[in-house]
Every structure is written in structure tokens, then in C-alpha cells.
Image (cartoon, helix red, strand yellow):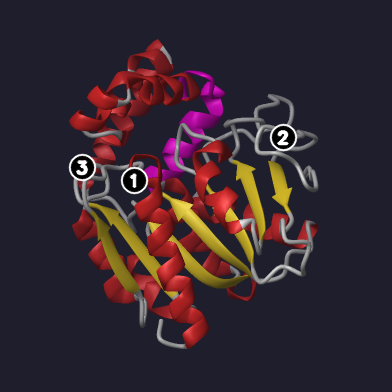
Amino acid sequence: PISRMTNPTPAQVQHQGATACTVHEPRNGQAPQRTFLLGHALGCDHTMWDALTQHLAAENRVVCCDQFGHGASQDPQLVPTGPYTMAQLADEAAALIDALQLGPVVWVGLSMGGMVGQELALRHPDKVSALVLANTTTHYPFEARQGWDTRIATIREQGLQAIVDMAMTRWFHDAFRAAQPEVVAHWRAKVLGCNTAGYIACCEAIRDVDTLDRLHRIQVPALVIAGELDLGTPPAMARAIAGQISGAQLVVLPQASHLSVLEQPQAFIQTVDTWLQGLEAGTA
């Protein structure tokens, strides 16, 4: 089940199903140039995209959703039991595209959202017209997978409180945390507000992500964004993605860690804008 709210403000989210979303129609009153579907990072919700949504919605339809166990998608009776797989999350995104009659979308995903986007383009190529994959990866090496197992076990035993401060140090670099402690506190509270079972199930999907050997099948334009200071999904992971998708563009944002769209919102927006202009001109 999927909920829909047309013309909401970013603060208004209606939850009637497992996936809660907002649908922003173009503010200029014209037919949308494109339709964007935005997928957020683990522990966040759709509001991480507020700056980008506000920008894109001037001329485009922008749909923002909350993943299972996150934001408004937390009803224990509706959130599927885990573990999840990226294939399952991609199929849910495809079902949402059909339910809202969006047509092919430009998928914009960061971290977990980028993993879902890869799988969506592979499993449902007719649903995607272009991809923006930020701060994400195609797979994790054995040691990192063990790290995810440790995180999952810690959350099961001690709750999200036990891992939230570690997450903040990986999401935001030292200078940002010192300069904008209120932003860090806001997103720390978002993690603690997640449905624990849904969060764990998403961790299991992330741990098992595996798209590298299939990425060459993606035939749509792709923009790959990395954060210069990202420890969780470093630029080398972004280069691996860009190297497998024909014609993909890679941009590394300076002074950005894992949540690059929050640390460097204007640089992120400008990067997306430049790429979109290239698509229109046929040069991207």
C-alpha cells in the first residue's frame, strides 16, 4: 500500500501505507519537465532532500519517499518484516512508480537510496530515465560486511542509541560538526526516531548489496557524486560505479563527507543542474 499527497509542503507527509511519500507538482503551473523520485540514506528520511526538492520543484514533479522503518513509514502493522534485500526495495520503488503513474523517473539516491536506484535500473529499466547516485557503493568487502553484522548485533542488544554517535562521525566531517552542531543534533534525533526493526532490516539489505558485475547493463545517463571526505563510501567506490556505467559522469565534492547533500547543498544542487543541462544539450 502506498500513500499519496499532492502539492504538500515539505513538512506534510501523509501515511496510509508501507511507503509514505510527498508529491510536489511544478510551482510554475506548467507541465513538469521531468519527474524525480528521491531515495534517502539509512537513518534519514525524505527531508534530507528539502533543499534539492525546493530547487527542482520549480519546473519538475518531485516525489520524496520514506523507506520502510523511516520517517512516516513506520507503522509496525504495515512495515514488512526483515531482512530486506535491495531487490525487494527496488521492486517496492517500481510499484510506487506504477501506483502514482509517474512514468520513467530520474532517480536520485544517496547511500542506501543510491543502492536502491542501481537495483531499480537493473530490475526495472523501463521505470528509470536517468540516475543520480551519490555517496554509495556496489558492494562491500568481507571486512565491511562483518562490520555491518557487528552493527546489527549491537542494535539488537542495545538499541539505536548505541550506534548513533558513530554514525554522526561518519555522516559529517569534524569541521561541519563543530560549525553546525544543531544540524548534527537534528539528524541524530532522526536516527533515534527510526523503527528499530526496519532499520536493522535495511542494514541487512545494505550489507548484501551486490551490483558491480551487472552495472554495465544500465543504459541510461548517470551522474555519480562522491564526497571528498566520505569514509563510509569513499570516492574509490564512486569511481567503480562510474567506470561500469557507459557515459557516467563522476563528480567529487570538496569538503563533503557521507551526507554530501546536507554538508554542501549548493554544490550538490549545482552539480545536478550542470548535469541536467548537459542532458538537454546532448553532451551528458
194 in the magenta segment: yes
Q: Is residue 21 visible?
A: yes
Q: Earlier in the sequence, mark 1 or mark 3?
A: 3
Specify the amino acid type for callout 3: Leu
Q: Residues within 10 Å of mark 2 (few under 14, many from 20)?
A: many
Position of 238 relative to 22 (above/below): below
Looking at the rendered structure, the secondary structure element under dot 1 is loop
Is residue 187 rendered magenta in the image? no
Q: Is residue 105 above or below residue 254?
A: below
Which labelled disc corresponds to residue 231? 3
Q: What residue occupies the far front of the structure in this picture?
A: 28
Q: Earlier in the sequence, mark 2 or mark 3?
A: 2
Residue position marked by numbered label 1 in the rendering: 264
State which region is magenta. Answer: 191-208
Q: Earlier in the sequence, mark 1 or mark 2?
A: 2
Residue 114, given in percent of the width and then of the height, sits at 44, 55
SS category of the residue bearing label 2? loop
Of the 4 image quadrants, the one containing the N terminus is top right
Name the residue at 55% across, 35% down.
Answer: 82
* Discs 1, 2 touching: Cβ within 8 Å: no
Circle 1 residues within 10 Å: few <14, some 14–19, many ≥20: some
Badge 1 amino acid: Gln
Residue 185, x across and y down, in percent = 40, 19
The image quadrant where one finds the C terminus is bottom left
Give residue 125's position: percent from left, percent from top: 58, 74
Q: Position of residue 221 (x, y in %)?
A: 46, 77
